[in-house]
Image (cartoon, rainbow, N blue to C red):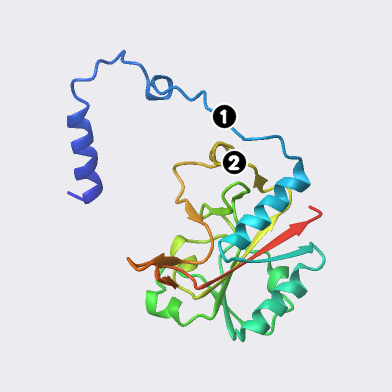
Amino acid sequence: MSSRERILGRVRRALADVPPDDTPYEQAVVRDYLRRHGDLDVPATVELLAANLADYRALVHRTDAAGLPALIARLLAERGSATVLVPPGLEEAWTAQARVTRVEDRADSSPHELDRVDSVVTGCAVAVAETGTIVLDGSAGQGRRRITLVPDHHVCVVRVPGQVVSSVPEALARLDPRRPLTWISGPSATSDIELDRVEGVHGPRTLEVVLVSGE
């Protein structure tokens, strides 16, 4: 018996005495809270996202679709990256101008192999302005969760305004809860009891977010 089967068996036993006509969970929980706060227009929402990303110590860049390949090439060159990990489905044009070795994401890649990669470039599913959060869901152009948690440098592309929402409830409405969701608010960091900040503990030390306008 697998761990999954064991867990699901326990769930079924816990729910054995629930009446068949019991109120469905979706109706039992009242969700009449505000979906967004304030009434910012699109440009103001994007500015709020950029400000909160920077507040979390992410490096924010802006460009249009035509300038994206050159910008990514510059960011990788400034980082001194010789290798870049690219998830399946990432647009090849994004890294076409970068003088690096593209490393394809493979299911059998070990954490040690991923750790030797200099940078990773991905897209995202949605970005939340109020919290400065980028959400990845593992779909095409984003890859598996571990490729954005092991390499030390992550370049994440956000399409503006199509992938930007104001609040977390708005983001949840766009996401599929069955997918592996990764919520990123700045580079990986933690603080000890003395409040000394340490970055790169369980993810990349450097997060660069590229806001691409003109979809």
Quick one: which residue is furthest to the top in this view?
A: 21
Residue displayed at 68% across by 50% down: 48
Q: Tag 2 or tag 1, which sits nearer the N-term?
A: 1
Kind of residue at disc 1: Leu
Vertical position of residue 142 compared to residue 34: above or below? below
Q: Which mark is residue 103?
A: none
The image quarter containing residue 213 is bottom right
Coordinates of residue 58 in the picture (x, y in percent): 59, 65
> Please, what secondary structure does the residue beneath circle 1 have?
loop
Left or right: 201, with 72 as reference point: left
Numbered label tally: 2
Coordinates of residue 1 in the picture (x, y in percent): 17, 49
Residue 147 visible (yes or no): yes
Vertical position of residue 29 compared to residue 57: above or below? above
Marks 2 and 1: in contact by CB < 8 Å? yes
Residue displayed at 81% across by 54% down: 214
Left or right: 126, with 27 as reference point: right
Q: Residue tagged by mark 2?
A: 167
Kind of residue at disc 2: Ser
How would you rate the neighbour count of disc 2 (Cα within 10 Å): few for under 14, some for 14-19, many for 20 or more?
many
The image quarter containing residue 157 is bottom right
Coordinates of residue 63 in the picture (x, y in percent): 78, 64
Q: Residue tagged by mark 1?
A: 34
